[in-house]
Amino acid sequence: MIFFRSDYSSGAHPRIIEALAKTNLEHTDGYSLDPHCENAAALIKKRLGDDSLDIHFTVGGTITNLTAIAAWLRPYQAAVSVASGHIYVHETGAVEATGHKVIAMPGKDGKLTPDDILAAVEMHKDEHMVQPKLAYISNSTETGTIYTKAELKALHDCCLEKGMYLYMDGARLGSALTAEGNDVAFADLPQLTDAFYIGGTKNGFLFGEALVISNPALKSDFRYMIKQRGGMFAKGRLLGLQFEEMFRDNLYFDIAADTNRRAKTLRDGIAAKGYKFMSDSPSNQVFPIFKAEKVAELEKKYFFLPQEYYDDGTIAIRLVCSWSTTDKDIEAFLADI
C-alpha cells in the first residue's frame, strides 16, 4: 500500500534520527531548560530577526492550541475560526473543554476574513454572550490554501481595531511559506500575528512544535499554563534538538519545498488527465474529485481520506505528500487514474 493519508505517518528525516542518536547519552536538565532548546530558540529568533520573542516547545498541535487559547482568554471569551478550522472540527472539543467557545464562521476558500471577524463581533455584543477575543487561522488551511501578506495584514488590523488577538496555527507552516505564489516571509510573521507556531510534526520531525509569542501581553507566566495543561515534556531536549537541527541551516524549509514539489507533480498530473479539484491548493495537500467507483478502486492500493461527497456521486479525496513521499509513489498513482 502507498500512503497519502497524512504527512506525519512515517518516522523522521534522517538528519533528525542522526542527531538524536548522536546525543542519546547526553544528560541535560528537563522541561526544555537545556542547551539544545536554548540554542534552537536562538536560531529561530535569529531567523525571525527579533530577540524579544518568546519561544516555547511543545509536543503537538492540539496541546499547543488548547494551551495557548486557555492562557490568553478570560473565562467568558471565545475564539473565532472558520467552520473547517482544526480547533472547531478535529480536536475533539479540546478548546471548548478549557471553557472557551469556538465561534465558527463561513470564511472564503478555507480562510478567515475580516468580514468574518466583524460579523462574529456584531453577533456577540453584550454580556449575555461570549466575547470574541482571539481569531484563529491556520496556514496552510485545512483545504490547502494559503494566506497572502495582504490578507494577514487585513486580519491583524481588524483584530487590533476590535481588541482581539490573531493566532496562527502553523502545523503546515513550512508548506505554506514555500508554496508557489506565497508572498509571506518567515520574518513577517511576528509583525502580522500576535503569536504563531512552527509545525514540526508534519514537516519531517518525530514530533514537536515551537510556539512563537510576539505580543508582550501574551507572554507572562506561559510556562505555568503549559505545565497545568499537560504539555510540559520532561525530556524537552528532544524537542529542542530537532528544531536545532532543522534551523541550523535551511533544512526545515528545504523539506517543505521538496514536499510541495512532489505535491505539484501529483496535482499537475491529475489535472492533465482532466480531473477537477475541490480547492485550489498550492501546498502539500491535493484534493482531486473522482467518481465513487474510481475511489473504491484506488482504495485497494492507496491510503487516503475522503474529504467531501457530492450529489452527483463523485467524491473529493485528500492526498497528502510528506518528506517521505517518493517520485515512484506519485508515478504509480498517476498511472492508476
Image (cartoon, rainbow, N blue to C red):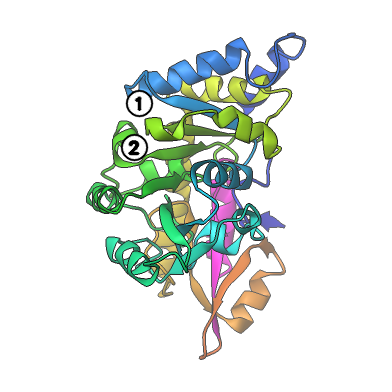
Tell me if 274 is positioned left or right of 77 in this view.
left
- Please provide the residue range marked out in magenta: 314-337
Q: Residue furthest right?
A: 25
Pick whichever, 14 or 85, lies toward us. Answer: 85
Q: Is residue 167 visible?
A: yes
Q: Quadrant of residue 60?
A: top right
Labelled pair 2, 1 in contact (Cβ < 8 Å): yes
Callout 1 secondary element:
helix
Pointer 2: what residue?
Answer: 189
Where is residue 130? Give x, y as percent: 48, 63
Pick whichever, 127 or 122, lies toward us. Answer: 127
Callout 2 secondary element:
helix
**Residue shown at the point (46%, 25%) measured from the top left:** 54
Label 2 environment density (alpha carbons within 10 Å; few <14, some 14–19, many ≥20): many
Vertical placement of residue 17 versus 144, above or below? above
Tell me if 304 is positioned left or right of 151 in this view.
right
The quadrant in which the C terminus is found is: bottom right
Dot 1 amino acid type: Leu
Residue 295 magenta: no
Where is residue 93? Give x, y as percent: 64, 60
Per the rendering, the mark at residue 48 is 1
Vertical placement of residue 82 versus 164, above or below? below
The quadrant in which the N terminus is found is: bottom right
Dot 2 amino acid type: Leu
